[in-house]
Amino acid sequence: MKLKHIAVAAALMTSGSAFAGVTGNVAAFSNYLFRGITQTGDDAAVQGGLDYAHDSGFYTGVWTSNTAFGSYETDLYAGFSGKAGELTYDVGYIFYGYRDATKSNFSEVYAGLSAAGFSGKLYFSPEFGASEDEAFYLTASYAIALSDTLTLTPQVGYSFGDGVETGILGTPLAPATEDSYLDYSLSLSKTLEGGYTFTAAIAANSEEDLIGKESIYVGLKKAFDL
């Protein structure tokens, strides 16, 4: 999932839990950003997903959202998460599919570590987006618990590689020649009764001409067991 994935929720994409079961989620956001770039323009996003997690740490799922350029996006992913002492690790694979823009379909593998509220993850794609070049994405965040139901999360991401230049920065999205850029966000999430989470966030990126340079968005997500 984009989060992917900021996937307009620190969702940046959905990770598997340590407990067996099938869960679902539906959400509506005023915008959908992927690594600091809007995917819906000035339009809102309606999103949803299904996840399966096993006690062993294996998880898999599917997530979908409308977009401005590909009718809708569907992400398929699978991975394995577990603990090593105080560290939680997460490794996996994601396929990003776009129904009406199949040339933009691509895959990534990822590996991440988290502990004490800190989280870091590295993504790699051998053929990023509509390009035939490789790209990397490194992201880090820190979840600050303001109360039992309120969390403030600063995040920063770094996209780099030839695929970033040819797949993003060398396209009409941003006619530039650089092969890297930064994105950053600050999100405030409030857990509500009934499995709801409300999120308000501000996000930006370092490229002067990159679409979605500064965005403020809000959204409501509902999680449920199946």
Image: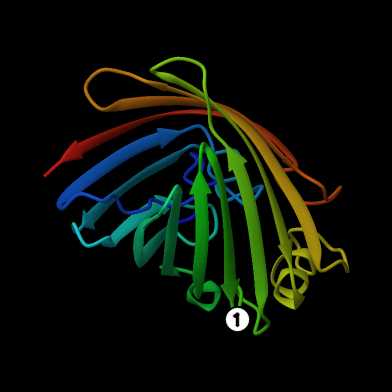
Front position in the image: 35 or 38: 35
Q: Which quadrant is the N terminus positioned in? A: bottom left
Q: Position of residue 85 (x, y in %)?
A: 42, 52
Q: Residue furthest left?
A: 226
Badge 1 element: loop
Q: Is residue 132 visible?
A: yes
Looking at the image, which residue is at 45% across and 47% down? Answer: 86
In the rendered image of this protein, does residue 139 appear above or below residue 190? below
Q: Residue furthest bottom?
A: 132
Q: Which amino acid does label 1 sit on?
A: Glu
Looking at the image, which residue is at 68% across and 82% down? Answer: 133
Which residue in the protein does label 1 denote?
Answer: 127
Residue 172 appears left or right of 186:
right
Looking at the image, which residue is at 34% across and 65% down? Answer: 80
Q: Which quadrant is the C terminus positioned in? A: top left
Looking at the image, which residue is at 45% across and 29% down? Answer: 219
